[in-house]
Image (tube, coloured by chain):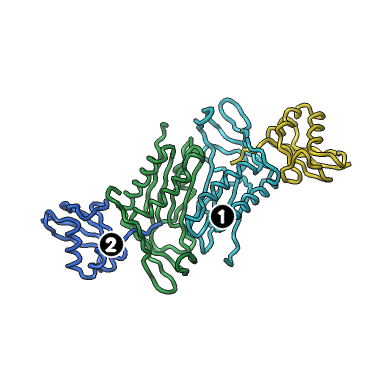
Chain colours: A cyan, B green, C blue, D yellow
Amino acid sequence: MTETLPVIYSITESEIDLNDLLARITLASTGAAAIFTGMVRGITSRGGAHETEYLEYESYIPMAESKMKQVADEIREKWPVVEGIAIVQRIGRLHPKTPTVLIACTAAHRDTGVFEAARYGIDRLKEIVPVWKKEVGPDGQEWVEGNYIPKPGE
Amino acid sequence: MTETLPVIYSITESEIDLNDLLARITLASTGAAAIFTGMVRGITSRGGAHETEYLEYESYIPMAESKMKQVADEIREKWPVVEGIAIVQRIGRLHPKTPTVLIACTAAHRDTGVFEAARYGIDRLKEIVPVWKKEVGPDGQEWVEGNYIPKPGE
Amino acid sequence: MNKIKILFFATIRDRAGTKSMELDISADMTIAQLKDKLGADHPNLKESMKSVLITINREYAFDEAVVPPNAEIALFPPVSGG
Amino acid sequence: MNKIKILFFATIRDRAGTKSMELDISADMTIAQLKDKLGADHPNLKESMKSVLITINREYAFDEAVVPPNAEIALFPPVSGG
């Protein structure tokens, strides 16, 4: 492999452009991409059913980007065949249906772990990347509570 | 659920626009999407290592679209929580790094089978949707051979 | 007699030298008999008939199926999309 | 004495009433001692100190760690991004 393996990690206030991000992690040897995106739900039924007007995201940006790079490094260690990785979290005021986060992994073939790698990426982002969201709805506003306690070395 | 569950299935000669397709399968209750895309590899190392100048795709279009709908129906039956489904195959002359196929599934949450549903979708498309590709490279051109024999009822 | 339309794709089309043809066949002809007939009438196709996939009106069909009137038949190799 | 900077995020910032502060602390102060001090100096934060996450220079840190000079400390609740 002579091409550099591309990795994108970014906290952004701009729209997440899937076409652009995918192109930036596609190599000449790439034949498959697994992409996860999360969106703001306007209507939630699991747990306490409720409506959401918008989410307000904030981040400890320099640490978040460094932890995203760590997530990308963990993916490469677990799935060495992964070629390109993109991890993007959008922050600011985001309304229902808006993509808020993207994890994308590319590889030569689809049976190499790209799906599992993307799934791992979003799970880890939700554990260790310092981003928080406040939910604003018809009944007021409330911080969404995470529940993962990082361990030493994470 | 009062909203209609969106399903997109299409053979197209146009660029695959991930942003647009994702928006079209996002409901107010959607919080997660798993997307698979395949691209033309310019360099292949698995199997007989070789280079590809371009792929020429063709399809039996009306049957392909009807089989894509069948794949979407199978996904809904296996993962009833899936909200939106998009299955798109691009045909024509496609060069390395170009996305050729997309399978996307949305759901309220990411732990509901969306990743597995997208994986199932691309596996089934490669089994039963009538599309073929001819590979053109420095050493001439050759049809890519599939190997799945559909069973009665497929 | 039944009038049918036959479509060819990919390698099968290359060997047939045409994208489609119309054919009159006997009313009780099965897919197996149609394959024999095509292999006999078009020697280039004879070898392909062993592994070809066949559809009747856009659904996969198998040897025992009887070809209905005005059927749209398609012949092609295993699919290779994606 | 060590000069350090403390950043607050999300619920912890709301309770602290500020995004950041600068502080002079003794050179051998641990994270556990810093939490005690913050809880004592800012009664609003006392309850939060039980479950707060703490970082030193953008890495997660734990009770026994000694706060180095010029450290950038951050306090925040478990993350909820995505």
Circle 2 is placed at which residue position? C51
Residue plotted at (39% across, 46% down): B8
The N terminus of chain D sits in image quarter: top right
Q: Position of residue A137 (x, y in %)?
A: 57, 29
Q: Which chain does tag 2 point to?
A: C
Q: Is residue B138 visible?
A: yes
User: Is residue C33 left or right of A28 when viewed as pictured?
Assistant: left
Q: Position of residue B112 (x, y in %)?
A: 48, 39
Crowding at label 2, few (<14), some or many (≥20) Cα neighbours within 10 Å? few
Q: Which chain does tag 1 point to?
A: A
Amino acid at dot 1: Trp
Q: Circle 1 sits in a helix, a strand or a loop, which is it?
A: loop
Circle 1 is placed at which residue position? A79
Q: Are marks 2 and 1 on the same chain?
A: no
The numbered disc on residue D52 is none
Vertically, is B139 above or below D24? Answer: below
Q: Position of residue D11 (x, y in %)?
A: 68, 32
Vertically, is C1 above or below A92? Answer: below
Residue plotted at (36% across, 43% down): B73
